[in-house]
Amino acid sequence: MAGPGRDRVVKLLRQLEHAACRCPAHSNTFHQGSPLTCTVRKTDYAFEMASSNIRYGGGVSREIGMDLQNLGARNVCLMTDRNLFRLPPVKAVLESLAKSGVNYKVYDNVRVEPTDTSFKDAISFAKTHSFDVFVAVGGGSVIDTCKAANLYACHPDADFLDFVNAPIGKGKPVTGTLKPLIAVPTTAGTGSETTGVAIFDYEPLKAKTGIASRAIRPTLGIVDPDHTLSMPERVAANSGFDVLCHALESYTALPYHKRAPCPSNPINRPAYQGSNPISDVWSRHALNVVAKYMKRSVQDPGDVEARSSMHLASVFAGIGFGNAGVHLCHGMSYPIAGNVKTHIAEGYSVDHPLVPHGLSVVLTSPAVFNFTAPMCPERHLEAAEILGADVRQVKLVDAGAVLADTLRHFLFDLQVEDGLAAVGYSTEDVPALVKGTVPQERVTKLSPRGHTEDDLALLFEASMKLY
């Protein structure tokens, strides 16, 4: 092409170039020595999917000895808790290690709902020995503790708060290489075998926080549904509520392209990025599985199909929320768990007051989703329909109320405590609960609806009683 036509095309291309976003994905104009930054967009323009490799199948944990041989492991750290150490899941793993001649040491002092103190104890154990592979057998508490032990053993000079999420910690990116970590989940809830997140109680503030980095996610998650058959009824219920809220929160989270700031370097893009088209698929599917199988898995511990399905749902939701993130239910749950006074959770072998994580998350869910619905009512209404509501005549303006009522019925059928008051809280505790929620910016900023401290107070008050 030549002449005036070519000149018009060149002029148009130059106009488009000047109008275009200068972020790395949309510009081929790079300057050596200058950081790659979004100079036009304030919010992000991309999302990144990351997950552990997952192996699923009944009895598959018997393969772990061969996996460790294949990794060339010479000195393995196996982490669990004292109760699990006596149960079939750990026995199956230890038998596999013995059969393959793998050298290992056991740390069984993991605390259910870990704290900074219990994390540091596990880290000290890991630093004392020169482990080349880590294995976690247990629920989210065990897997998260093992992630932290691996991280700090591989960064021996780091201060504990270096990698802890801001504003509590410094939130530094993890730049060093970690040892392989194989996670064998024994509960169907946290999805920790898929994510780069480790949650703990930060005792000085009486609130949960965590470490979030793709670098700490397990190398392999071995998902053996046989292990779920040993879960007590209430453990199965509370684990399932975590799956339910992972799916609901990640599906309704702020969209990734509305999350700020736009990172100046890909290493600064957070693990929790906002809802996105790929995470949506996993979250929606997890919600469908929960709707079909959760009640069965709780009401009949011997229902292998239901318990196996919930184990997979935990993985599905883990992949979804591990990349999209969660928001207010989880942000508000951390002070609920961290400020527990006297509540003793049924089905848990612990020597301290405990509001299990899944319970602390789900107790605020009716109030939270009634609050967030105006920002994406179609998604809230779709969730209500998946959970069994008849939404054919429902207006979008009523999406929040319908989802809240659907959740209340779901929780009532599963005999959930009647709100925060039933686990030891009163309206006098609301200021402390709000104070513990404020630092949870890593998740609360992903709420699709902005909120103030007064909004949080109203949500806690509305959650004192459910039925």
Image (cartoon, rainbow, N blue to C red):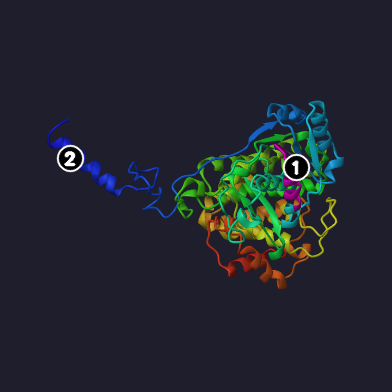
Can I make out residue 221 in this image? yes
Please report the bounds of the magenta region as a residue range: 121-135
Residue at 74%, 57% (x, y): give it.
117
Can I make out residue 384 in this image? no
Badge 2 marks a residue whose secondary structure is helix
**Mark 2 or mark 1: whose residue is earlier in sequence:** 2
As rendered, which of 464 and 267 lies closer to the eye? Answer: 267
Outermost residue, bottom side: 428
Badge 1 marks a residue whose secondary structure is loop
315 sits left or right of 377 in the view = right
Q: Position of residue 463 (x, y in %)?
A: 69, 63
Quarter occupied by the C terminus: bottom right
43 sits left or right of 238 in the view = left
Q: Position of residue 412 (x, y in %)?
A: 75, 54
216 sits left or right of 423 in the view = left
Q: Which residue lies under the disc numbered 2?
A: 8
Determine if the magenta segment contains residue 127. yes
Residue 129 shows which numbered tag?
Answer: 1
